Amino acid sequence: ASVGVIVVAAGSGSRLGRPEPKAFVEIGGRSILSRSMDAVRGMSEEAALVVVVPAALVSAASAQLDELRMPAVVVAGGDTRQRSVAAGLEVLPPEVEVVLVHDAARVFTPPDVFDRVVAAVRDLGHGVIPGLPVTDTIKGVAGDGTVRDTIDRSKLTAVQTPQGFPRTHLVEAYALAAADFTDDAALVREAGHPVGVVAGSALAFKITTADDLERAEDVLRRQGS
Ligand code: CTP
Ligand code: MG
C-alpha cells in the first residue's frame, strides 16, 4: 500500500479529566481508540496503519487492534503530540508514499474525509488538510481584555484531521522542526511546502472536554450503534 495512516492516541486527556488516558475512555462500550479505527477500516483503499499510544498501554492497545483484526504497528508516543507523530513516522513501512496523520480523539470522522485527503494529496502533490468554515464571529482581543477588531472569518478555516502529506514533505518538516506546533500542517508550512484545504466534516469534531464526550454519546444514539 502506498498510503499510511498514523493515528495518534498517546495523549493523557487532561482536559477530559478521566483517570485513564483519553484513548481508553469508552463511548457506548467501546474505547475511543477502537472507535477511531472504524474510519481507517472504511477507507476505499487499504492503508498501512501505525497507532501511537502511551508507553504503558502498548500491549493493551495491540490487544484491542487484534480484536478488531486490524494489522497495525503500535508504538509508544512522546510527551507532546508532535513527538508522538515523530515516533509514528519512525516506524512507517518503507513503501508508504502518502501519509495521513489523524487524531484518535476525532472518533466519528467519516471515511470519505480520509479518501478525499488521499485523493487531493495525489492530485496536488502536496499536503492537504480538512477544514470547515468558521461560523462564529471572531474577535481579536487586546492585552487589557478589550476587543480590538473583528477578524474576517471568510479568510479562516477550522482545521481537523486526517492531515495528509507526501511522505517526503512530512519527514523533511519533522527533521527541521524547531518549535512545538499543534498540527502537522504548521510544520510542513514552516518547511516551505504548500498545504491545501479540502472539506472536513462536522462529525470529525475532537473529543476534548466532558461536553464533547456527551456530544459523542449523542451521535451514537442517533446512529443507533
Ligand atoms: N496526542 C498524542 N501524544 C501526546 C499528546 C496528544 O498522541 N503527547 C494525541 C491525542 O491522543 C489526541 C490528539 O493527539 O488523539 C489530539 O490531542 P488532544 O486532543 O490535545 O489530546 P490530549 O493531549 O490527550 O488531551 P489534553 O490536551 O486535554 O491533555
Ligand atoms: Mg493535548
Image: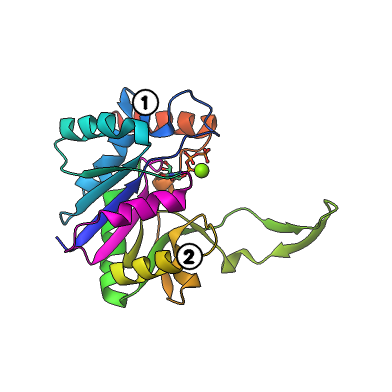
Residues rendered magenta in the picture:
79-107
Q: Which mark is residue 116?
A: none
Give the mark nearer the N terminus: 1 vs 2: 1
Neighbour class for label 1 at 10 Å: few (<14), some, many (≥20)? some
Neighbour class for label 2 at 10 Å: few (<14), some, many (≥20)? some
The scheme the figure's colours follow is: rainbow
Give the total number of marks visible in the rendering.
2
In reply to whether residue 41 is colored magenta, the answer given is no
From the Cβ of disc 1, is ligand 1 less than 8 Å away? no
Does any portion of residue 220 appear in the rendered image? yes
Per the image, label 1 sits on a secondary structure element best described as: strand
In reply to whether residue 93 is colored magenta, the answer given is yes
From the Cβ of disc 2, is ligand 1 less than 8 Å away? no
Q: Which mark is residue 26?
A: 1
Q: Is residue 183 left or right of residue 36?
A: right
Compared with 61, 135 (above or below) is below
Quadrant (top left, top right, bottom left, bottom right) of the C terminus: top left
Residue behind mark 2? 177
Residue for point 65% across, 67% down: 152
Residue placed most toward the observer, 26 or 138: 26
Instruction: Tell which tag, 1 or 2, sits nearer the viewer.
Output: 2
